[in-house]
Amino acid sequence: HIYEDSQNASWYVANEIASLIKQKQEQGQKAVLGLATGSTPTKVYDYLVQFHKENGLSFKNVVTFNLDEYFPMSPDSIHSYVRFMNEHLFDHIDIDPHNVHIPDGSLSKEEIRKYCLDYEEKIQNVGGIDIQVLGIGRTGHIGFNEPGSSLHSKTRLVRLDRVTRLDAASDFFGEENVPRRAITMGVGTIMEAKRIIIMAWGEGKAPIVQQAVEGKIKESVPATFLQHHNNCDFVLDGAASSFL
Ligand code: GLP
């Protein structure tokens, strides 16, 4: 789906999510959303907040699982994805906090393995993710699945690519402050979602979008694995689609 600008593209994505939530409400079921951070999905979250405040869209039946979190990272830190999600979405809607899941960056290294297995189990226990929202990193990462991540990888502790840390440097007041690791859902976790919506804006993303959509499927560009998914939409603005 190619839109003139990210505003129109985000409007489409927000409406797809709202439709799912309403459809599940009518069926008396939970809507399970996989959510992403970064600058890309923020307008989608703005629209969802608007739908809640102006159109009465309720999130009481919504369960969310975020893709990733830096490690180590305190949830209270201004850099945490917990803070990001609260600020952009959760603080403004009527979601039950018990239904919100974001990988915990404050665990000890010994606790992480079990925690990641439990994260996977929680996703399974609610019947899997209905819509997984994704952005894409310049390395071709989805979540924090950097080049070299396998198709079957699950939620785990990973090492961040230099390019990813450079891209995050301005948020952390310098590259040296960017954590070297993160907890992320795996490519396999993402691939199990019933529907995937991956978004990209701006010409900076054009080369990696071209590789993800048209390139050979390979571990060195994890987003190419999405070509294997039978219900995955790329939602782009004109600039991000310009190399296709
Ligand atoms: C981070 C996030 C990814 C996101 C990527 C792109 O690495 N962990 O989930 O897709 O950044 O960020 P942006 O949307 O700011 O371009």
Image: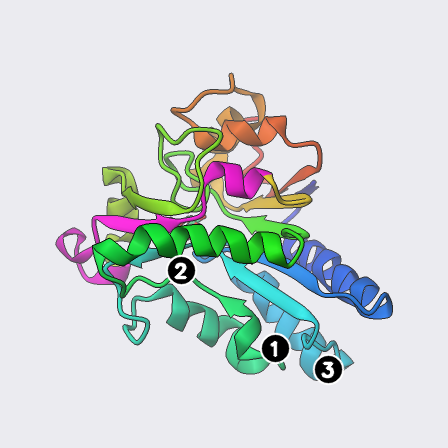
Q: In this view, does 224 lie above or below 30?
A: above
Q: Dot 3: within a 10 Å radius of its alpha carbon, few (fewer than 14), some, or many (20 or more) residues?
A: few
Residue pointed to by mark 2 = 103
Mark 2 is on which residue type? Pro
Q: Position of residue 18 (x, y in %)?
A: 74, 64
Label 1 beta carbon within 8 A of ligand 1: no
Q: Position of residue 214 (x, y in %)?
A: 57, 21
Dot placed on the residue nearer the N-terminal end, 1 or 2: 1
Question: Is 114 left, or right, of 123 in this rendering?
Answer: left
Image point 30% across, 76% down: which residue? 76
Mark 3 is on which residue type? Glu
Of residues 168 and 76, the one nearer the viewer is 76
For label 1, the SS is loop
Q: Position of residue 55 (x, y in %)?
A: 77, 79
Dot placed on the residue nearer the N-terminal end, 3 or 2: 3
Distance from disc 3 to disc 1, alpha carbons, whole Å, reads: 16 Å
Q: Is residue 240 above or below residue 228?
A: below
Q: Nearer the viewer, mark 3 or mark 1?
A: 1
Distance from disc 3 to disc 2, alpha carbons, whole Å, reads: 31 Å
Residue pointed to by mark 1 = 95
Residue pointed to by mark 3 = 54
Question: Is 93 left, or right, of 219 in this rendering?
Answer: right
Q: Nearer the viewer, mark 3 or mark 2?
A: 2
